[in-house]
Image: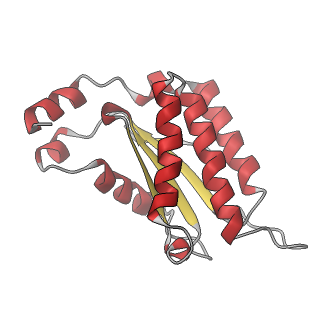
Amino acid sequence: MSKIARIFTHLCAAPAARSFNAEALAKIGAQIASCESEHRGEIVFAVEGDIPLRDLWRNVSARDRALTAFAHLNVWNTAANNGVLIYLLLAEHRIEIVADRGFDASVSAEQWRGVCQLMEEQFRAGDPLEAVLRGIRAVSDLVAEHFPQLPGHVDEDELPNPPRILR
């Protein structure tokens, strides 16, 4: 896509709040809380309707925005390095997963990509809420394999569960 076409796509993009109303956001937050009770990891969902014009002009990618969100939302700052960000850029229909270094040796890029593909299929079916809920469940299943809940241990919820609307 050319730079001008990309800018036009973002200028015409609907706000994230149009795709995810208060009820949907509450369901996403509840799904994150429920899933996190099954393991010691932290899951954060962030959605952005579009990228700011100045960043589009500089060719900032959806991945770049996800990495920035990962840093700004402190997903990297968990005690066990076990935070995972699911980032959705609505204007480009892009899903990015950024996982902290605690997953580097155990979860492959292909496994994270599989979660993205699962979500993309549901988005194509026209159900963005179900796409996000299924994506959170799939991420949680991967997290639980590598950071299972320990018997007798109460895991601290280090990051807020409500989804983040970035723009």
Which of the image's four quarters has the N terminus? top left
In the picture, measured across the screen, residue 136 lies left or right of residue 33, that is left
Where does residue 17 sit, x and y in percent of width and height? 46, 27
Relative to residue 159, is residue 108 depicted above or below? Answer: below
Relative to residue 40, is residue 97 depicted above or below? Answer: above
The residue positioned 48% from the left and 46% from the top of the image is: 116
In the picture, measured across the screen, residue 93 lies left or right of residue 143, that is left
Q: Residue furthest right?
A: 152
Say whether residue 159 is visible.
Answer: no
Where does residue 68 sit, x and y in percent of width and height? 35, 58
Which of the image's four quarters has the C terminus? top left
In the picture, measured across the screen, residue 99 lies left or right of residue 129, that is left
Q: Nearer the viewer, residue 54 or 41?
A: 41
In the picture, measured across the screen, residue 134 lies left or right of residue 118, that is right
Colour mapping: secondary structure
**Figure quadrant of residue 166:** top left
Where does residue 36 sit, x and y in percent of width and height? 72, 56
Where does residue 41 sit, x and y in percent of width and height? 66, 64
The residue positioned 66% from the left and 33% from the top of the image is: 26
Total count of labels: 0
Relative to residue 150, is residue 14 depicted above or below? Answer: above
Relative to residue 162, is residue 75 depicted above or below? Answer: below
The residue positioned 74% from the left and 66% from the top of the image is: 156
Q: Nearer the viewer, residue 56 or 93?
A: 93
